[in-house]
Image: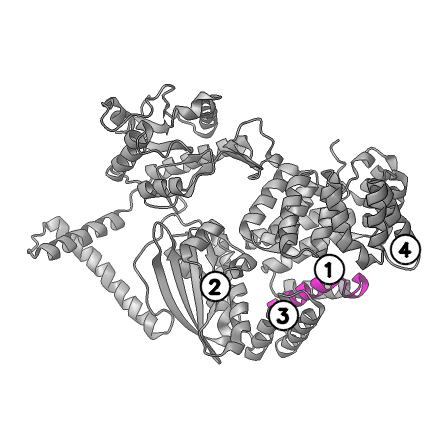
Amino acid sequence: MASLIEGFNYDIFISYRQKDNKYDGWVTEFADNLKKELEATFKEEISVYFDINPHDGLLETHDVDASIKDKLKCLIFIPIISRTYCDPKSFAWEHEFKAFVEQASNDQFGLKIRLPNGNVANRVLPIRIYDLENTDIKLCESVLGGVVRGIEFIYKSAGVNRPLTPSDYPEKNQYKTFYRDQINKVANAIKENISGLKGEPLEFESESKEVIETIKNSSVKGKSIKFTARFKKRVLLVSGILLAAAVIFVALILTNVIKGGKPARAEGIKSLVVLPFENFTGDEKLDYVADGMHASLIGDMGKLGALRVIGKTSSSVFKNTGKSAPDIARELHVDALVEPTVTCYGDSVCIQIRVITPFPEEKQLWVADYREDKSKIAGLYNRIVKQIAEELMIELNPEEERLLAKSGIVGKEAYDEYLKGLYYLEDVDKESLMKALGYLNRAVEKDPSWAPLYTGLTMVWASIVQMGFESPEVAGPKIFENMNKALELDPDNSDSRFISGEMAFLAEWDWEKSEKELLKALAINPSNAIARVIYAQLLSSLQRPGEALMQANMAIDLDPKNPMLQLQYAAALLCLGDCENALIQTEKVTADDPGHYLANNLIESAAFLCGEYDKVIEAAKFILPARGISFEEVERIYKEQGFIPAYKEILRQSEELAQNNFFIPIEMAIRYMMVNQPNKALEWIEKGFEIHDPNMAYITTRMYCFDPLFSNPRFIDIIKKMNLPLPKN
């Protein structure tokens, strides 16, 4: 069967080591499933070369079948990257992988191609079936000339590292991947790559390279150049464009928009991290300015749907660590880094932006300097994002163009107060939150028309009530008042949309509104990690577990080092019944902060569902004193009589205290289910419904141990009143 493109013998070549197919025929099954998926993806017939009995382990001195070179004349090369594939002595490595890279690099398309969306991709599409050692990764990168990007078929759990199979349960896999989804991703990637190959070549780019290369070679040899008439036309065309670019470049320098740039071009960058701003103003007191600018730039970079932009908390972890760009990139799994610096801050703001690619070696892709009046700072962030997108060859869609075209004016004094408010909002202790509230209220007095001020106030009040520093009766109206004002002034604020969706989920129990608002937040900023993880929890309550897991995994990839997001991710996993991985996530937080209240609260439920009662009691040690319960007595009973008597003691003390103190109804219901008293649990669930306990939004998920109640008429009646879908079992 011929290729879709004339001159090629196959569309796809699958390369592998025979060792990886011996045990269970994994590669053969993969090839068969991929062929079926391709039939459902393409209208045309796709030709796939897959040799069921390839040569293996041949040395370079062995005679190589000449026909393999013809078979390698294909559009897409798929190596099955395993722990044995990366072996320079093997036939697959030397005569298939390396041979294809060399052959493709010299054909009419080249090894790297432009996709229809403007991004760049490699014609080598690796399928990774094991987590690899660094030496193997570097070996692959040395051949590809860049980062090994591909699609993973890996099953990973404690002590396990093997290929993913169709029967594997995703929630037990550390990577949470569905085999069927991964097959679909491969077919979609092939379709995208072939569409790129079928597109028109970039004539200007290829011709300009020819001009530059010819001139460079001539100057080295010291010879004069004799141009053909056709070549002279090319030189004139390219020279004219370069001259025009130079004029524009000088104009930009004179207008203080850009100072300079480096001519390395981006290829296939799909993720980046904006590192913390360096404060080069000479005034250490302006650290709050650098911190606030960091948050603002990340928020605007997140509007680029083609990029995965790492969250501020995970980025800030690397401040003053001295880690190299490649080390940071490996740790966060990103393709590029943005290094911003603030060099002046007064009536004007001076910022320098550097974009760095870390692989195969650290290289400055682009650098620019900006100077802007402080009152126009919001528009400056958007301009920076648009220029970075251009340098990364990202084509903006109409909605992104609209969002990034917005600009506004903010009072200079109000902006100072705003940055100070954001700085103190980072800490959730009472003193810091009160300072943040004061700064933001003063900012509103100085400029009541700037939407981000009200978004900041909404976040402060939400943190105040979440930490228990104020009652919902007092904080709730403040949250809604500021949230609605922020949306009135700017309906395109992702954070305000997120809070609106979260309130609709937890406070209003309006599931349809919640989903609409959360989706709006993610449409504005696809890298809004907290919006994604809360959306995952909502989807669990709506009995849509597959979508929930996908959103939760996307969220943790966006801000993997954020303790609060780790806990929300753990809660999302617990909603899906994955107590083991929920425990792993929460214990990452308690490893650094053993007394973390929210983490221990989650551990209490997760450990109980996993049957790890020692961990339940250990978590209770940090939770119970805050409720006025004597842990010493509980611990004594646990050691002498066991778990259920110990928890009955917790409930006895709780019921006494509840006569004069507020106890969270769902918390009480969970503990009654732990001691197998469903009727008492239902009484507290009914109280939770009466007072509108926000935790009621999760009662149909697996977060709590309510499964035995799912068929109880009293429980079903509450679910129907809340308009929640019934649990599927």
The three-letter amino acid code for the residue at tag 1 is Gln
Residue 535 visible in the shown view: no
Gap between marks 1 and 4 measured at Cα: 20 Å
Which one is earlier in the sequence, the residue at label 4 or at label 2?
2
Circle 3 residue: 424
- Residue 307 in magenta stretch: no
Which one is earlier in the sequence, the residue at label 3 or at label 2?
2
The three-letter amino acid code for the residue at tag 3 is Tyr
Gap between marks 3 and 2 measured at Cα: 25 Å
Which one is earlier in the sequence, the residue at label 3 or at label 1?
3
Magenta region, residue range = 449-474
Which one is earlier in the sequence, the residue at label 2 or at label 1?
2
Circle 4 residue: 658
Q: Which mark is residue 382?
A: 2
Circle 1 residue: 466
Q: Nearer the viewer, mark 3 or mark 2?
A: 3
Query: Where, quadrant-wise, is the C terminus in this rendering?
Result: top right
Toward which corner of the image does residue 224 lie, by quadrant?
bottom left
The three-letter amino acid code for the residue at tag 2 is Asn
Query: In the image, what residue occupies the spot 57% across and 48% down?
Result: 556
Gap between marks 3 and 1 measured at Cα: 16 Å
- Disc 4 element: helix
Main secondary structure found in the magenta portion = helix
Measured as percent of width and height from the top left, residue 219 is found at 12, 57
Above or below residue 260? Residue 507 is above
Please tell me how crowded label 1 is: few (under 14), some (14-19), or many (20+) other residues with Cα within 10 Å.
some
Measured as percent of width and height from the top left, residue 167 is found at 58, 26
The three-letter amino acid code for the residue at tag 4 is Ala
Please tell me how crowded label 2 is: few (under 14), some (14-19), or many (20+) other residues with Cα within 10 Å.
many
